[in-house]
Amino acid sequence: MAKKLKVGDQIRHYRVTKVFGPGMMAISYGAETSAGEKIFLKQYKSPAPTVVWYEAFVAYQNELGARVKDGRAAQFAVRQVDAFEEIWGGPCYFQAFEFVENGADLQQMLDEEREEHRRTELPATSNPVVWARHVTWAKVFMTGMAALHEAKIVHADLKPANAYLIQDPSIAAGYQLKLIDMDFSLLADRRAPWHGHQGYIGTDNYRSPEHMTRGAVPGLASDVFTCGLMLYELLAGYHPYWTEDQAEYARLVQSYAAKPPALVGLMPSPASNFEISTLLHRCLSPSPTARPTAAELRASLSGRGARTSAVEGPAAVTTSGSAARRDAELIISDRIELVGPEGGSLQIGVRTEIGKPLIRQFGPDSEFWDNRQCVLERNSGRQWVLSPVAGTPNETLVNGAALTTPHVLRQGDRVAVGRQAKGIAKLPLTARALR
């Protein structure tokens, strides 16, 4: 039987410097080469050399490592530097990976933000500096995922703890990304050797529907599902399915219980809040074929995606207001006007974040508006879409109903702030097209 390494042990030309501890499949160590280079060493408990799929697993790992090394994924995924079999009390398999340091994983960074803001009532993401940082992390993360998928690699165990970020002011993004813990990742075009022998690796509250369906195999779309959960956390400030009960998590996932999210801030132009909200919601579809690709998500976060036209339906717009209001003419124009109770007018022709600074002209009730209350933008069909900003003290209302998802405005829609449950609507503004 193989035995555990300890600090100071030498195996091949690697000297163990730290024991990180056992995982489900392997024991992890910090080590140094004879030249003093740091590496991350894994000693596998499973598969043991005696299992029938062991040799196929070794070949599979070699192919996985080669695909990372030989493509664009090498910039974003942890690189395998060695793989070997050795006798250490008994035969066992080892892999050595590049050592990532001088940064933190996304889970640590989010936890630190929450700790920093725990004494305030507002989420950390309501801070414009934090929001800008989250948008950057989202873009860097999806750039890395798109590169991984180009190599036909499915990470298969995505979660914030497996996205390691390193600040790097020498590059435009400001951060390097390393996707870690990929030793049980999958080749999208080759069945895993352990299929039929054991399940696929995943983490509570981040598993895709395919992870939880008997006989299904996680694919590229499964990664996109989990990317959607992580992007909800970054851009909307919450995980739509988080629960301690994993049976309940599975029910929420399969029933597509999530709504298109209200983003916490305004996406930098030319990206569109409406498009991003719609795409994030699509990521969580129980059907893999309905989800966008990682490349589509990457492009849309930078405003390079194909614009999503607003269509009536629960996945794209709210159903606030009466049937009569839903029958009103959609506002399709190059410019829109919001008219105040006393006749004042706010005319808008470009994507605009609406809040107290713009609304003050309409009177003292503007104090009920947050500085960043909602976003008004025109989609590719020249329809005007109003999207709420998450975390505002008062709700954004359309025709008296709280706005929780993007809403296509119609002639005469009344936009206000207040509380739907209490029937309070402050400073209603009437929307109409400017021809």
Image: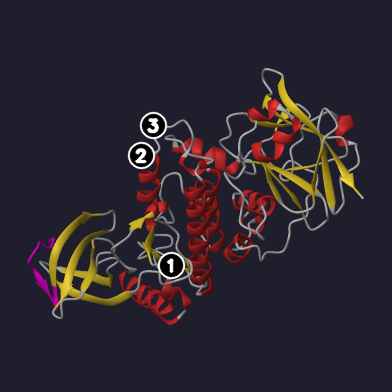
- Report which residue position mark 3 lands on: 119
**Residue 365, image quadrant:** top right
User: Which circle marks residue 192 in the picture?
Assistant: 1
Identify which residue is drawn at 87% across, 52% down. Answer: 333
Say which quarter of the image contains residue 184: bottom left
Q: Is residue 31 left or right of residue 209?
A: left
The residues tagged by marks 1 and 3 sit, at their Cα atoms, a distance apart of 47 Å
Q: Position of residue 406 (x, y in %)?
A: 71, 43
Query: x, y (%) of residue 79?
Result: 35, 73
User: Residue beneath label 2, please?
Assistant: 115
Residue at the (58%, 46%) spot, across then down: 265
Near mark 3 (Cα within 10 A), the count class, few <14, some 14-19 or many ≥20, is few
Q: Residue furthest top?
A: 422
Q: Nearer the viewer, residue 46 or 364?
A: 364
Q: Residue at x 41, y 55 (%)?
A: 199
Name the kind of residue labelled 1 in the image.
Answer: Ala
Task: Identify the amino acid type marked 2.
Answer: Glu
Q: Is residue 387 above or below residue 189?
A: above
Name the magenta segment's main secondary structure. loop
- Give the mark nearer the N terminus: 2 vs 1: 2
Query: What is the quadrant of the N terminus in the image?
Result: bottom left
SS class of the residue under badge 3?
Answer: loop
Q: In the visual, does 382 lie left or right of 288?
A: right
Q: Is residue 28 visible?
A: yes
**Closer to the N terminus: mark 1 or mark 3?**
3
